[in-house]
Structures are given as structure tokens and as C-alpha cells.
Image (cartoon, grey):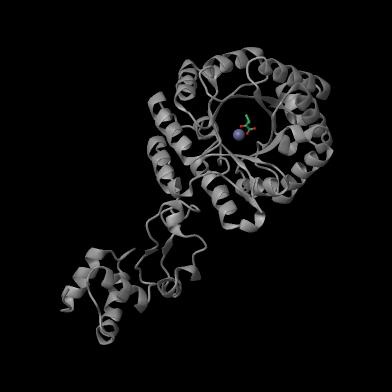
Amino acid sequence: MAKDHVQIFDTTLRDGEQVPGCKLNTEQKLIIAERLDLLGVDIIEAGFPVSSPGDFKSVEAIAKLVKNATVCGLTRAVENDIKVASEALKYAVRPRIHTGIGTSDSHIKFKFNSNRDAIIERAVAAVKYAKGFVEDVEFYAEDAGRTDNEYLARVCEAVIKAGATVLNIPDTTGYCLPDEYGAKIKYLKENVKGIEKAVLSCHCHNDLGLATANSIAGAINGARQIECTINGIGERAGNTSLEEVVMIMKQHPDLNIDTGVNTKLLYSTSQMVQEHMGMFVQANKAVVGSNAFAHSSGIHQDGVIKNRETYEIMDPADVGVTESAIVLTARSGRAALAYRAKNVGYELTKLELDAIYPKFLDYADTKKEVINEDIHILMEQNNIKL
Ligand code: KIV
Ligand code: ZN
């Protein structure tokens, strides 16, 4: 049975780039946009055109460059934002305007000093206005994670009627639990009239480390677009990490959902974004961290050397990593030492291995990691020849 396609909406250049210290110039944004297009994402959110002349210029340049993905620009539910976004997107092959407004009680009261009915009127007016420029209009209900479901359903129904093609349900503050977020998507699927005319989209933030889990819960419950960033960069604790959701869908065929992303480009894309943004992922970052396929304890190393699948649920080659790493430390066993020694040219007999292993441990206790040069030193000290 064919799997359902979940669209990947990449917002590295908008929600990701708004992080302090991650600012990119137009040339860098073009390099990343070109890579995202090659990676196979469905939508590239290129920026927030009204926010600055520089951002306008970048969105316009990306719109001219990108040939496959839809190019999207963010706006508030404000006519001038929408008009400016439509100008920035005018050269796009597939333009999308992403407009919206806060719908939680705290946004309505503190941000807008308004009321629920007036917010719906503004949402509808913004969508109708955007429809005057482009066919593809996505609506975001900001802070939908803390918006009560009944009111959220009313908002969704009204904007679908006004022509919205995608409904973004952001957990803006990263507050929801996976079951709660999944249930919200299910509720909307079951209770919004006209929902079959629109795609439900997950946009989750990572304040409690739940962005990926929440996005997957949304997709399991019927969302067919996930908004995410390379390396999970984004406001505060970040957004959903693109490489994580893509690999979850790939590694769990039982979910029956998939993306069009070329996973073999994930690692190099992650590296590219880290270098341009100067924002480096932690070693133990899932999928793309430097330790994601590195094994350091003796028990694990012995298993992986016998068969990779004992401790790896993904093939590193599938994400563009050449091979798993066996890291030599004082926790490594004989199998790992023999394996690494062989890789650098020493075929050890059992006797040699037994003799050198305690010396290796003494040596390793003085270092964080034993590298190839150390192996040569150890062998030389013990008269073992290449
Ligand atoms: O987190 C959020 O709510 C957003 C919207 C502007 C889509 O980024
Ligand atoms: Zn966001």
C-alpha cells in the first residue's frame, strides 16, 4: 500500500534564522535554499518580507532561484505585510503566503486587547486579502497549543471558508504533551467543517524537548505537513528538527507516512547550516551529532563489530555518514582494540592482543580518546610491527 505523503515545510531561513547570532546574508540564504530544494523539502519558508529590506531582498532572490519547492513568506494578519510578501514572492514558481494571528486567550487579551469574535474577523480578512495575490494561503493560529479546541475549530472553519489551503496549528510555546497535541489534531480533523479542503500542519517548538514527538503525534493523527528546521534551530529551545522527523518516518514503515526528502543529504546539509549559522549541534544530537553513530563502551563495540544492527537502528549511510565509529577509550574492550589496530595496519595475534590490552588501558586512562597516532605509539613501544 502506498504511504501517505507528509509535506516537509522547512523554516530554517525564517523561524531558524531569527535566533540571535544565526543571522545570514542573502548570499548564504541562497546557498541554503538551493540545498533545501535539492534535499527535497516541499516548502521553503524564505523569510518575513516586511520585517526588513534585507529580508525582502532575500525572499525575492530565493523566489527567483528555487525551481521545485513552494516558496513561502510569513506575514502578520496585516494588509501591508501581505502586500509586501506578495511582492517579494512575485517571481516564485509556486508562491505561498503564510499569514495568521494569535488565538489563545492570553494572545487575544494581552497582545491584541481584543476578543474571540474580532480575532476571527481579522483572520478571515487576512486570508481573503492574501487570496487576492496567491492561490496557496496558509493560516497560522499562533499559540494554538494553548488555544481551546472548540474555539480553534471555529477559527479553522472560518479561514477555510475564506480560502486557506493549509492550517498551521503551532505549539508556539512548546507546552503540549504528545498525546495532547495529537488529540488536538484529531479533534480538528473530526470537528472542522470543510477540513477535507485543507492540509493540517504541525509547527512545534522544543521548550520541553517535545517538538519532534509532538510533530509525529500530529502526523499520526492526520496532519500532513510538518514545519521544521535543519538541526532544530529556532526561537528559544528551537523548532522540530527536520532530520529527526524525516528519519522517524523512514525507520517506522508501520506509520505508513513518508516524505520526499533525500535522506542521504541530511548530514552534509546539517554541516552546511552549522557552518553558515555558527550554531553547532551537540555531539549527542540525534541523527546528525558527531556521536550519533559512534560506539564507545566495550559491550556495544563488541556487538557492533559483530553486526552493526545490534546497536544501530539506522544505517549511517542512509543519512550520508560514511561509517559507524568505534571510539577507543578506557571503556573499550579487546575486540575494539583489535578492530582499530587492524584498520591502521596491525594484524594482532591473540597473544599480542592479550599482552598489549592492559597497556592500552593504562594509556587510555590518561586520555579522553585514543586516536590512530596513539595506536602507532603503543605498537612501537611494544615492538609490534606494521
Ligand atoms: O511558533 C509560531 O507560532 C510561529 C508562527 C509565526 C507560525 O512561528
Ligand atoms: Zn515558530
Horizontal and vertical percent position of residue 265: 43, 46
Name, please, the residue furthest toward the bottom.
351
Q: Is residue 88 left or right of residue 386?
A: right
Residue 22 in view (yes/no): no
Horizontal and vertical percent position of residue 267: 43, 48
Q: Nearer the viewer, residue 9 or 365?
A: 9
Name, please, the residue furthest toward the front.
1
Horizontal and vertical percent position of residue 181: 72, 45
Q: How many marks?
A: 0
Residue at the (15%, 79%) spot, across then down: 383
Snapshot quadrant of residue 338? bottom left
Q: Is residue 209 left or right of residue 287?
A: right
Residue at the (30%, 80%) spot, across then down: 358
Quick check: 268 above or below 162? below
Quick check: 17 above or below 369? above
Judged from the image, the quadrant occupied by ligand 1 is top right
Horizontal and vertical percent position of residue 334: 35, 78
- From the image, which quarter does the N terminus lie in? bottom right
Q: Nearer the viewer, residue 245 or 213?
A: 245
Residue at the (24%, 68%) spot, across then down: 344
- From the image, which quarter does the C terminus lie in? bottom left
Residue 251 in view (yes/no): yes
Q: Is residue 8 left or right of residue 38?
A: right
Residue at the (65%, 36%) spot, across then down: 172
